[in-house]
Image (cartoon, helix red, strand yellow):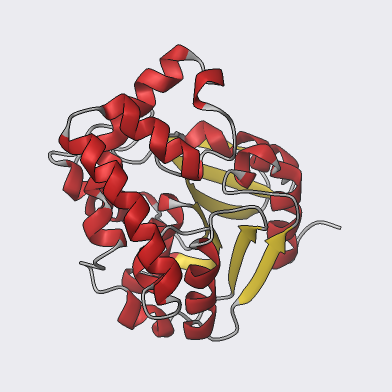
Amino acid sequence: MTTPFVRTFGDGPVPVFALHCSLAHSGSWGGVAMACDPYVTMQAMDLPGHGKSPQPTRPEEAAELAVAWAAETIETPMHLFGHSFGAYVALRLAVERPEKVLSLSLYEPVFFAAAREFDPEVYAARFSEMAELDDLMAAQDYEGAAKRFVQDWGGGLPWEMLPEEMRKMMAAGMPLVVGANEALIEDSANVLTRVPEISVPTLLMDGAESHPIVRPIQDSLAEKIAGAKRQTLAGVGHMGVISHPKDVAAAYLAHIGMGA
């Protein structure tokens, strides 16, 4: 098996394993990790094709590979913390490798399949948006697709304000984003039916300013995971892990019983 890149933040007593969002890298956890000091040691893994980690053989294999990498990297049980696509990977780990997990914290997992039955209207609207993305990808307009993706999930920052190198990186990463659709939309790994098996303390976190699809996803998961806690952060969007690290960290530390 190929080896992912993993960086470590802090040296506190609580072991945390963090998984970032699509089109980012493990460094995106730096602000949250700093705000969690001195309580945690955070290991943050670059997902397949992101940061310094190797590319998957095919974009469609990224989710499976991410789960396998994380399971291999976590030698003793840790507290899982995932954001967006990384939150989906963390959810799968909790389902498929529960012996690796002490607690589960998910910031806006983009597990669209969870919203299908919970709110069909919002789910259908999301599908219409994704059709635009599919058309751009079919035309190999990766920059246009990245711009459309950031419009929904970039936290409100205009595409034109992003550095050119970042825009190029995001455009190049779009096949990985679309390649995850089978897992996120079709639930190809059959995760949803097994979510009720999760028994570790679980926090479902989101921002009040996020995409409408987020709420039914979280509501669906909260209904399925016994004892799951919901927390919505006022004035925060999908990229809260980066834009509001202190708020996210405060909620997280309370969940794992640390901090003030």
The front one of 227 and 212 is 212
- Determine whether 256 is above or below 223 in the image: above
On the image, the x and y values in percent for residue 74 come to 40, 54
Residue visible at 69% across and 63% down? 232
Q: Is residue 252 left or right of residue 86?
A: right
Q: In which quadrant will I find the C terminus?
A: bottom right
Q: Residue furthest right?
A: 260
Q: Is residue 144 left or right of residue 155?
A: left
Q: Quadrant of residue 201?
A: bottom right
- Determine whether 73 is above or below 157 in the image: below
Q: In which quadrant will I find the N terminus?
A: top left
Q: Residue furthest top?
A: 164
Residue visible at 65% across and 53% down? 209
Residue visible at 72% across and 46% down? 36
Q: Quadrant of residue 29?
A: top right
Q: Quadrant of residue 120?
A: bottom left
On the image, the x and y values in percent for residue 200 come to 53, 76
On the image, the x and y values in percent for residue 84 come to 47, 52
The front one of 18 and 214 is 214
On the image, the x and y values in percent for residue 226 come to 54, 86
